[in-house]
Image: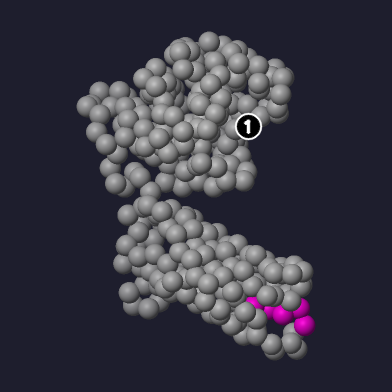
Amino acid sequence: MAWYPGAVKMELQPESDAQPAIRPTQFIVHSIIAPWTARRTYEYWRDSTSLESHFGVDYEGTVGQYIGTETRADANAGANRRSDGTGAVSAETASNTSGSDPWNDKQVEDLIAIGVWLHQTHGLPLRICRSHSDPGYGYHSLFPQWSTSGTACPGQARIRQFKEVVFPGIVARATGKTPTPPQEDDVPHTLGLYDETDRTLAPDKWTTLSIESVDLLKGASIYQAMVQVTGSVPEGSTLQGRFYHLRSDNTRWLGGITERVATAGATFADFHNVGSIKPTEKLRFEIAYFPLDPDDMRAITITTARCRGLYWK
């Protein structure tokens, strides 16, 4: 276990002893949507829920630590502990009940100090996480894998502070340099495409799907993308999807195939990929339909397609 010397130790049991070890590689900040003290946050974790964070940061400058940073805490969904043993350190911060207020000066100072300590103690790299599993620093809503059902946490005002004040402050203090805004490569761009054009898919054939354009992304170096399609697909039949990179010589790098089985009523199928890509390559997505009855040659209709994600140039 590792305990931050600037925190008041409020150890949660049995979680602190019972939960598995992690190798901390990320720091994820949250808003708890309540103006609680660090002690009140501890009491909430202890008495009211099976969730918990490593730290609680209140308005008055008190930092509470509830679990050692080399033990799993359950505040970050898929980032709590991965199959390779890595995991995220989490800090809940006091906020108003709508999560709309900025961190005050004491909270900013506490987050910077914790971030520097994590870099010095656990070797977290001084960068904003480039994917959901990439080591570094981030905030709860940065990647969908860090929450169970989507979130806006810690709120727009605090996301802006994280990018413009907190993270640059961590880097500056850890390196002894003057704070500067994060470089463009550190901050992801958003990918958002939506298309309601009806498209027919013939059976047993791969079709490149246009979502506003067949080129979903150009000029990127790293990306995380999700394509979701809605359609009238016979129950029990199969949709397969994969991303591919189209090179300038028209050859392809093919991603892995994901398979979804259609259900009764409308089918909502999602396909994901995370990877690096050359700026000269174009990201595309193709889909194939395989009927339950191999003799059924009727086409199906995709009614809606959307692409969401993040990318770095």
Question: How many numbered marks does the figure carry?
Answer: 1
Q: Name the residue carrying label 1.
A: 74
The residue stretch that appears in magenta: 289-293
| Amino acid beneath label 1 | Asp
Q: Residue at x 30, y 23 (%)?
A: 173
In the image, residue 11 lies in the stretch drawn in magenta: no
Q: Nearer the viewer, residue 247 or 199?
A: 199
Residue 292 colored in magenta in the image: yes
Q: Quadrant of the C terminus?
A: bottom left
Q: Is residue 188 above or below residue 196?
A: above
Q: Who's the residue at 56% across and 70% down the image?
A: 304
Q: Secondary structure at mark 1?
A: loop
User: What is the chief secondary structure element of the magenta stretch?
Assistant: loop
Between 22 and 144, which is closer to the camera in this rendering?
144
Q: Is residue 116 visible?
A: no
Occupied quadrant, residue 247: bottom left
- Observer-nearest of 296 and 47: 47
